[in-house]
Amino acid sequence: MDPRLHRYVLNFSDGSQPIQVDYPDTRVFRNCSSYGDRVPGLSWNEFCIHHQGQLEYLQDPKQVILEAIFDAIDGEELYPVAYERGRRVDKFLARACKPAIDKLFAQKLCLSISTGASIQISVQLGVAANSSKQISPPLLISQEVSRRMERLEVHNGVRGVLNLSNFGANPCFKSIVVSLANVATLRHVCSSIYHNDDSFSAVNGFIFADNQMKSVDPLKLFGDVEYGLLDLSGNKIASAVRLCRELKRIRAKELKLANNPITKSSKYPNSIKALQGNFSMVDGIPYDKLHTTYTPLNHDIDLESDGIRIDWTNKWKLADFEQSEDWHAFLVPDPMHLLTEQRLFRLFFITVNQMLTEIYPCYYKFDGKEHIFLARNCFEQIAYLVHSCNLEIKLPDAGPMVDRDVSVAPRTIPFYMRMNVSRFKLHHVDPQERITKCIQKCFVVQNRVLKMSHFQATEGLKGLWVHMGSTRILNNILSIISRLYMSNCSEIRLCNNSILRMDGARVLSRMGSLRALDLGHNWIHDLEDIKSLGDLPLKSLRLHGNPLCGKYSLPNDYIQAVLKIFPQLTTLDGVDLSSKPGQAPQKNFLCDIGAYELLGDVFLRNYLRDFEQAEERANRLMKYYTDDSIFTMTCNYVMGRSQSFKAQLFKRISKYTKHSRDIRKWSDYTKATNEFHVGVMEIIGVLMELPSVVHDFISLQTDVMHFNGKSAFIHVTGLLRDDSPSTHNQEELYLAFSRDFVLKIDDQGKGFGKESRRLKIVNDHLSIMNPSRNQVKSAFKVCPLPDNRLMTPASEDSIDAKNDKLIIFLELTGLTSPWCTRIVETAEWDFELATKLFIDMVEKKELPDSAFH
């Protein structure tokens, strides 16, 4: 059909002169390598892409076609105008593009699509006359670049950033195709920037994100100058060799490469080592630490196609992988993201069989819909999870709050697996090697102490979960410790590691110098679970914070039970046993008995424990604050008062004085609000700057001065120890502190049974000061046992007499031990007065049901 019958006019409504398409030359070139005697001049040419509808299944067929065209013309100028999508044929106009046309004809007008298909194109030359007043893509691009250079932005603290992300999506390009994937277009953009004499000097960074770019060669125009930022994220950069060559002269403080194919290569980040001197950071990570962020889930593995899926329908196939040493993937669907990483692994390790092979989850990530992690060399454990647990992670029972008359279905979290998703490679995580290196980092040579408290938080274990609640894993760790420190370790600190039992502790008998062991705040429920430690020549043992401590009504009972297994002990929980410990002074002062729970796990103890987790404070403490919360602090620590001045001490204390709000030291009172922090994000930012600490919970004295069921005011004082990892080889630093909390109940009726409440901090003030001599002398040495059963010291009665009084009063009243102890303390151990107090409280209905057995 004669194309002249389809004449039309293109009017872009932008002030430019319309294009009259009238096809004066009817020749159409297709499937040929030459246009003969015709010479493409400055007139408009029409390009038709005959895809015949075979690309409709793709997400963006137009982008696939344009990418194939730009690959074919290999850096030559081509600016498609009036691109029109059709069911079988797409078409557009372009002019002044002879080099591009030549390269298309050199390929016989055939495009190779990324899907592997080949598509024919046809070209008709000179379909419309050209005029200088018609639309000009290069001019529009230059004008838009100039506009953006007049509106430089600030990104992550870097000023003067020229933002060209997703540049072709700008509305001013609605009638033309502008793609920086075409090197010629990128070259024109860079030239427009470089030759803008008025604004270029102010440019301190570039954002070229999300532009489908494969090559960045034109950026060399900006070489030999130090910039603040170069963002190339979200492109299609796949060749590390080409990238290093093209960025050889480019320098910036940070380079962003996220979401490029290059970052998914198994050779990344070593593949861009040549750029180490050009950029200080890559994707927010210091260059020298870039290798630690590697994960095969992002670089080597495609979970859509790699490996064999195992779920409820084909569990029988699992046997095929018994001898496999490859990585296997666990996938836990969670579209609402109800589980945190910590919560997931806590439940996961409750589900696994603690007596079977060790299992070390590695490379955890959440992809928006699923929790994913890898494991290998643990088939026995995987078989148990698949067959015995039916591919389900157990959730703890809801407990007494659930109506017992209602049938409750088992509460589980389903998961599935992909087996053999990747072979093990030399640079992958080797749990045994990684654990050994981290143990060595924890040893303090000066005082021969192995500090493995919160071992999972050790920097070298990022990407590897080590659960000491597993008997096999703990035994392996104890075996490594005994081999490394046979003669030069005197104390091991293993608190806060979720340890359940220590059946294999006999391997520690190789350590001839071991005399002290700290197992505080673990999950040990019975002394029988650590009976194997009785064979060691321990002089000091710490068990405070374990569930086993709650089994004993009286401190003396606890001490005697421990001594039956460890008769050689001289110190228990930091207390010299020769001093006949067992009584402790009153610690809690309450204006209302209803506030008692606030001092325990409902708020105070949980908050202080979360505060101790320095690296996780942002995640752990955010739940306590709101956008209206207020935080202030003061530091009145005097250097010369408690110990001689040291440069190290000054550096450690300065972390507190930095945010101290001490009006006595101000010369300008207009700065009164400088250290007045409002809102959750600002408060968390300040708390993250404070050092890691450990609270001496036994030193705490609390006073609830107001409580009405809706709000409370808590004042707490005590002692803490600076426990920053960088100071482990320095002298212990003890600090006295006080903390004032104003709380409100933000929400009620939460959780299972709808009986939980959510507390929020309205106002929080922290004070740091010098500890007294008595505080330092007793630091972490007051017997805390049993928890919440602390009694006033005897005045006339002996310890045994007071224990007898408590036993009789327990039998007489039927009270629980904490309430019994509290009433007897109030009566100053006068048995008759205590009985009258009890009767009076019963008559006034001041005792809750929970006070009785």
Image (cartoon, grey):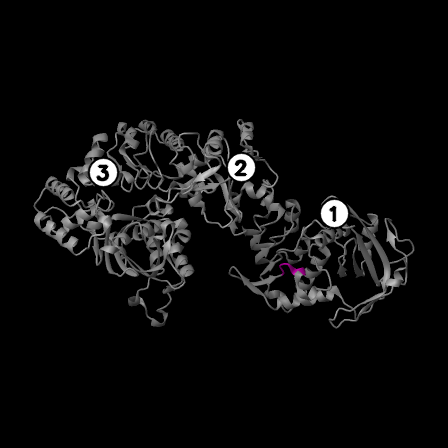
Question: Which residues are drawn in magenta?
Answer: 164-168
The number of numbered badges drawn on the structure is 3
Name the amino acid, label 3: Leu
Discs 2, 3 touching: Cβ within 8 Å: no
Name the amino acid, label 2: Met
Residue 417: which numbered mark, if any? 2
Residue 572: which numbered mark, if any? 3
- Is any part of residue 364 visible from this angle? yes
- The residue wearing badge 1 is 113
SS under mark 2: strand
SS under mark 3: strand
Instruction: Tell me the residue at 76%/60% (across/down).
Output: 83
Report which quarter residue 66 is drawn in. bottom right
Q: Earlier in the sequence, mark 2 or mark 3?
A: 2
In the rendered image, which quarter contains the C terminus? top left
Instruction: Tell me the residue at 39%/64% (across/down).
Output: 628
